[in-house]
Amino acid sequence: MDSGEAHFVSWKAAFEANGHPFTREHWNVLFGRTANDFFDLVMPGSTSTERAAVLAEKSRLFLGDAVRSVQLCPGVRDLFAVFAEQGIAPYVVSSSSKANVEAMLHMHGLDLPSVHAADVKHGKPAPDMFLLALERARDEGNDGRALVLEDSLSGVRAGVAAGLDTYGVLTGGFPEQELVAAGARQVFPDAGGLAQALQRG
């Protein structure tokens, strides 16, 4: 889902409402990472109470208005159709909260299993989230091919660190060369590009 701008707007408003500037430069570093990473960079040394206040405001803003602007990235439904044909079980692996992910999925009529930052000790770019998704998929009997499609540098690095075939898409705003440098095997304009590649074998 193309949720980057909605998350940026919500984080910016929440931080600034609590007296902390939040810029595009912050966002470019933090996109795809966990809330704790946001606080470590923007509010170093802050207390758990201070962080909780910002996070509550961010969640209120995102789930109130911002989530309505979130669209499915181009080619996602085509990719899901190819997954179904080839027996690949999709998982959503997100640094966002469970509530945010479920709200976005529900809005687009999708019922998919997901892994969130709160499920693991270390978020992206550590491999933990992808390894947990892989473990859950295998527990459900899905032991075939596993791959990662990511639109952020931290996400690509996490997929590579998990030892999985990792591909990039340009829908997150990162240039192709940066995604390749992070470890992406190939970069597509959008999810439809991976769908076509899988069909070609």
Image (tube, helix red, strand yellow):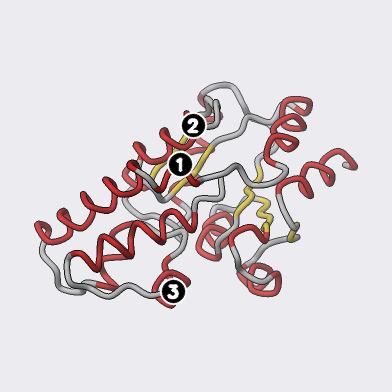
Residue that extends furthest to the right in the rendered view of this protein: 200
Secondary structure beneath label 1: helix
Q: Which of 133 and 82 is in front in this view?
A: 82
Instruction: Identify which residue is drawn at 15% across, 73% down.
Output: 45
Residue at coordinates 57% horizontally, 54% vertically from top-left? 159
- For label 2, the residue is 107
* Residue picked out by circle 3: 24
Q: Is residue 65 above or below residue 157?
A: above
Decide: is 145 above or below 180: above
Direction top: furthest residue: 141
Q: What element carries label 2?
A: helix
Taking the image as shown, residue 147 lies to the left or right of residue 36, namely right
Number of other residues with Cα within 10 Å of mark 2, as a class: few under 14, some 14 to 19, many 20 or more: some
Q: What residue type is labelled 2?
A: Met
Mark 1, other Cα within 10 Å: few <14 / some 14–19 / many ≥20: some
Q: Is residue 183 left or right of residue 40?
A: right
Foreground label between 1 and 3? 1
Kindly check if marks 2 and 1 are in contact, taking CB atoms under 8 A apart as contact: yes
Q: Which residue is drawn at 26% across and 60% down?
A: 14
- In this rendered view, identify the residue nearer to me: 139 or 118: 118
Q: Distance between the residues labelled 2 and 1?
A: 8 Å
Tell me how far mark 3 sits from mark 2, CA to CA: 27 Å
Image location of residue 187, percent across then percent down: 73, 61
Judge the density around disc 3: few (<14), some (14-19), many (≥20) Cα neighbours within 10 Å: few
Q: In this view, does 52 lie to the left or right of 156?
A: left
Q: In which quarter of the image is the C terminus?
A: top right
Badge number at residue 68: 1
The picture quadrant where one finds residue 42 is bottom left
